[in-house]
């Protein structure tokens, strides 16, 4: 299994995803500023993994604190704010920071700094372990839902599934969210072939998902982002499943740019299109997708392809990293707690009450 991220002996270890699959660079750091830079540059990426990386980054930050107990609150506040400013869309980052902030507020008064820091270390490792476990739960719920929704096809043949961006071990720590569902479905003999769209401009689908599928020996083919409608028209896709970076209370879902076009095409062709994401990706505090902050990244990511200039340096560019798919285009949202189909507003709220 790929070791995308780990924290051992007060050191953060991660696989630098920017150069995959051509180069496998493993990085080790004790420096929290370097860890923030890794999140910003997408050396580590994928919503659940960003949450885990944020938690470990905060731990690196507190490890380098040298002041008194009285000085710690101001230091901690600045540290968390710096980590939270690294990427805006994946809510897992804020979810992880909130879990560590809670450990701090619940224990600061009573504990020595040493005891407090030990509790925060444990909390960060727990966030990591939870995300690994979530993958298995999502996979099971997703496969059950697919067996129900696509039973009519499964009577005669296996399924062709479209996915976008990367939602595997590299993004989620465990087997993956959408890719975890696909992996289990394949193990159960339900999948003919995976169709992975490239995910311009940083090519997470072409580089990372393809790499993970290749390692597992799962049959796949890569397509350009603009090909999905045509393949659906030709009957070459039976359903779609992707991950999420933030899901609003009504089911509107932010995911890698290009997702919304795939989902609308699937809806037009009457094909089920699912989101698979842990509950840590649901932002129940926002009513709909218009409130999701959408990251806009450096224009040169689009004007160049891996360092090679393909447009003039002054070409005006809009480089949104994510789009928002309205919940009405989704057949279901597969979480670690259950597969939610139907009334997202009530059902997603219910997940937080359980
Ligand atoms: O910009 P990235 O690579 O961090 O994008 C996040 C994603 O990996 C995807 O949007 C993904 O589908 C959701 S995270 C499993």
Image (spheres, rainbow, N blue to C red):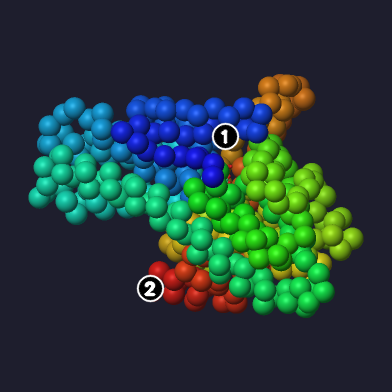
Residue 41 in view here: no
Locate residue 185, reporting x and y percent. 65, 63
| In the depicted structure, whether residue 340 falls above or below residue 275 | below
Locate residue 86, reporting x and y percent. 45, 37
Q: Residue 18 vs residue 11: left or right?
A: right
According to the picture, the residue beneath numbered tag 2 turns out to be 353
**In contact (CB < 8 Å): disc 1 and disc 2:** no
Residue 130 in view here: yes
Q: Residue at x 22, y 30 (%)?
A: 65
Q: Residue at x 71, y 66 (%)?
A: 190
In this view, which residue lies farthest toward the right?
234
Q: Residue 180 vs residue 116: left or right?
A: right
Residue 25 location, quadrant: top right
Using the numbered discs, state the Cα–Cα distance from disc 1 to disc 2 in whole angstroms: 36 Å
According to the picture, the residue beneath numbered tag 1 turns out to be 17
Q: Residue at x 65, y 61 (%)?
A: 187
Would the CB of label 1 be found within 8 Å of ligand 1? yes
For residue 183, the mark is none
- Element type where label 1 sits in the image: helix
Locate residue 89, reporting x and y percent. 51, 47
Reading the chain from its start, which is encountered first: label 1 or label 2? 1
Residue nearest the viewer, comparing 343 with 234: 234
The nearer-to-camera label among 1 and 2 is 1
Would the CB of label 2 be found within 8 Å of ligand 1? no
Residue 238 location, quadrant: bottom right
Q: Residue at x 15, y 44 (%)?
A: 115
Residue 177 location, quadrant: bottom right
Q: Quadrant of the C terminus?
A: bottom left
Locate residue 154, reporting x and y percent. 76, 73
Total residue callouts: 2
Q: Residue 170 vs residue 81: left or right?
A: right
Disc 2 crowd, CA 10 A, few/some/many (<14, 14-19, 20+): few
């Amino acid at each position: 299994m790929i070791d995308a991220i780990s924290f051992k002996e007060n050191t953060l270890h991660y696989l630098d995803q920017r150069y995959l699959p051509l180069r496998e660079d493993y990085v080790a750091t004790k420096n929290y500023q370097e860890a923030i830079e890794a999140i910003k540059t997408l050396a580590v990426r994928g919503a659940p993994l960003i949450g885990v990386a944020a938690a470990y980054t905060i731990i690196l930050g507190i490890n380098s604190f040298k002041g008194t107990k009285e000085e710690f609150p101001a230091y901690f506040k600045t540290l968390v704010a710096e980590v939270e400013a690294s990427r805006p869309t994946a809510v897992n980052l804020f979810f992880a920071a909130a879990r560590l902030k809670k450990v701090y507020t619940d224990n600061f008064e009573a504990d020595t700094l040493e005891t407090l820091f030990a509790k925060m270390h444990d909390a960060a490792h727990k966030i990591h372990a939870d995300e690994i476990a979530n993958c298995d739960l999502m996979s099971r719920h997703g496969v059950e839902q697919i067996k129900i929704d696509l039973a009519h096809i499964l009577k005669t043949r296996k399924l062709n599934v479209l996915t976008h961006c990367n939602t595997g071990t590299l993004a989620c720590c465990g087997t993956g969210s959408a890719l975890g569902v696909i992996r289990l479905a394949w193990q159960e003999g339900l999948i003919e072939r995976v169709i992975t769209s490239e995910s311009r401009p940083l090519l997470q689908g072409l580089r990372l998902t393809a790499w993970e599928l290749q390692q597992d020996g799962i049959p796949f083919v890569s397509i350009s982002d603009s090909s999905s409608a045509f393949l659906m028209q030709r009957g070459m896709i039976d359903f779609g499943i992707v991950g999420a970076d933030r899901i609003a209370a009504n089911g509107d879902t932010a995911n890698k740019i290009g997702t919304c076009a795939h989902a609308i095409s699937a809806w037009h062709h009457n094909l089920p299109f699912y989101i698979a994401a842990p509950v840590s990706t649901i932002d129940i505090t926002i009513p709909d997708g218009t409130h999701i902050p959408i990251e806009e990244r450096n224009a040169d990511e689009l004007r160049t392809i891996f360092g090679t200039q393909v447009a003039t340096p002054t070409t005006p560019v809009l480089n949104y990293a994510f789009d928002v798919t309205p919940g009405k285009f989704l057949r279901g949202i597969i979480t670690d707690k259950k597969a939610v189909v139907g009334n997202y507003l009530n059902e997603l709220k219910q997940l937080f009450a359980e």
